Amino acid sequence: MAAPDLLDFAGIEPARIPAVPLEQRLAEMLHAYTRSYGRGHPSSRRKDLIDLVLISELADFDDAQPLDGAIRKVFARRATHALPASLPAPPTAWARRYGPSPRKSASRRRSPGA
């Protein structure tokens, strides 16, 4: 990834920043989210689900083939479980840990008598 060329006027080239391709990172998060850990314990990687949702809403994947290829390669290389046909629901324990959503909490604060 290249930084903006803000110092081009001074003859200074933009910095090059090594980065993992977004497709690779999404594939790794998907794998971690769908994996069970020791004796069937679900993933504890709540942040991966949030990242998956945000990236899927914000990123523009005009060509899904690189993402599909990255997902298949990660699942094949790690060989811990099969690529699921659909995303499983988040573990119920995640809801208990975080409690009500901030939106619900805010509406309760504004309600008379709350």
Image: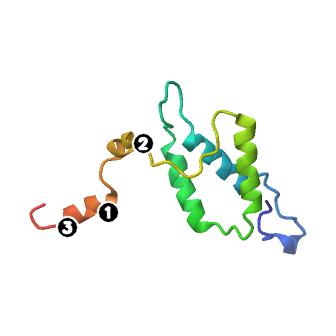
Q: CA distance from mark 2 to mark 1?
A: 21 Å
* Residue 10 location, quadrant: bottom right
- Please name the residue shown 33% across and 56% down the image: 101
Task: Find numbered disc 1 in the image and state the secondary structure of the residue it sits on.
Answer: helix
Task: Find numbered disc 2 in the image and state the secondary structure of the residue it sits on.
Answer: loop
Name the residue carrying label 3.
Answer: 110
Q: Quadrant of the N terminus?
A: bottom right
Q: Quadrant of the C terminus?
A: bottom left
Q: Amino acid at mark 1?
A: Arg
Task: State the image coordinates of residue 6 (x, y, percent, origin top left).
Answer: 78, 71
Name the residue carrying label 1.
Answer: 103
Q: Badge 2: few (under 14), some or many (20 or more) residues near its Cα, within 10 Å?
A: few
Q: Contact, CB < 8 Å: mark 1 with mark 3?
A: no
- Please name the residue shown 26% across and 58% down the image: 105
Seen in the picture, residue 93 relative to 62 is either above or below; the reply is above
Task: State the image coordinates of residue 84 (x, y, percent, origin top left).
Answer: 59, 46
Relative placement, left or right, of 105 versus 94 is left
Seen in the picture, residue 94 relative to 19 is either above or below; the reply is above
Task: State the image coordinates of residue 88 (x, y, percent, origin top left).
Answer: 50, 48
Relative placement, left or right, of 15 versus 91 is right
Name the residue carrying label 2.
Answer: 91
Q: Contact, CB < 8 Å: mark 2 with mark 1?
A: no
Q: Badge 3: few (under 14), some or many (20 or more) residues near its Cα, within 10 Å?
A: few
Q: Amino acid at mark 2?
A: Pro
Q: Earlier in the sequence, mark 1 or mark 3?
A: 1
